[in-house]
Amino acid sequence: MKLLSFKAEGRDTFGAVVGDRVVDLGRVFKGKYADLVAVLKADAVAELEAAIEGAQGDYALSDIEFLPVIPNPPKIICIGVNYETHRKEIGRDPSARPMVFARFPASQVGHGEAMIAPPESPTYDYEGEIAVIIGKAGRRISQEDCWEYIAGYAPYNDGTIRDWQRHTPQWGPGKNFYKTGGFGPWMTTRGEIADNQDLHLKTRLNGMEVQNAKSSEMIFSIPYLIEYCSTFLPLEPGDVIVTGTPGGVGVRREPKLFMKDGDVVEVEITEVGVLSNPIKAEVV
């Protein structure tokens, strides 16, 4: 099942994709679940699956405004330098533990919405990534048990303002400019993807492929990341773990390749879908 958050007829709601249409599950459940976080907290994904059986859909995909898959995540936990190709291209020494930093919800946009290039910097870079959405609360989750805590997977663009990223060792400023990250179009639920399946990640800028990797190439696997992150704080339904970008980022190319007004960037997980966003310069 493909679950998404969207806006239609002036309402923020959530639903499921059926063919090229969307079932408005917010309307179906009439306030029982306010959003996808509430669905995950109630362990109600199976209830949603039953609700869409035989449904024709309320809206065409082309008629909705996509929101970030989880517009209100309790936490967005990002992992840096998690592919060997990226580690080598930036010249970083191997690390025994993941590099962890945070994004905030206001830095995200949904599929089809413009990612904003701020006037403060010309170094707006793409980072195609696999996002893991947590579906069950847990602390100190073992790698063996991690899969039952996963609600689903989605493409993510961890758009980065490179010079601001270097302002501090923690990277926070460069990773949290307003509306610089893309998250969507939907999450494919765990039931549609085999546990430990090798997911194929690609990024394209104006149709040119700039990144291509498999999840098996991660330095720290998805089970390890869940075990590690759940050790230092509890994971909650709706949390998002953004698992890192492979090699091919624009700042390490010659000549450098940054995103600018009028560009279109796509992040594809072959087994999930394609996140596409235009780039728009912010006018101040």
Image (cartoon, rainbow, N blue to C red):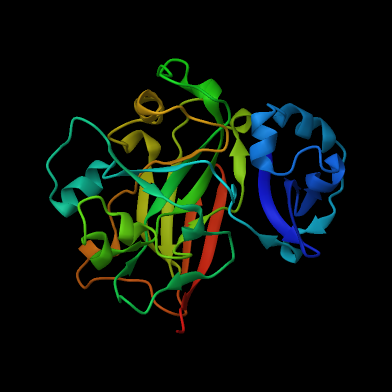
- Residue 88 lies, in percent from the top left, at 17, 48
- Across and down, in percent, residue 146 comes to 47, 22
Residue found at x 70% / y 28%: 42
> Residue 165 lies in what quarter of the image?
bottom left
Question: Looking at this rendering, what residue extends furthest in the bottom direction?
Answer: 284
Q: Which of 246 and 139 is in front in this view?
A: 139
Q: In which quarter of the image is the C terminus?
A: bottom left
Q: In this view, does 196 lie to the left or right of 26?
A: left
Residue plotted at (42% across, 52% down): 202
**Side (left or right) of 253 relative to 271:** left
Where, quadrant-wise, is the N terminus in this rendering?
A: top right
Vertical placement of residue 42 versus 182, above or below: above
The image quarter containing residue 144 is top left
Q: Quadrant of residue 55?
A: top right
Residue 232 appears in the figure: yes
Q: How many labels does the image show?
A: 0
- Spot occupied by residue 85 in the image (x, y as percentages of width and height): 23, 47
Placement of 54 over or under 86, stated as above or below: above
15 vs 229, left or right, is right
**Residue for point 53% across, 70% down:** 114
Q: Position of residue 208 (x, y in %)?
A: 40, 67
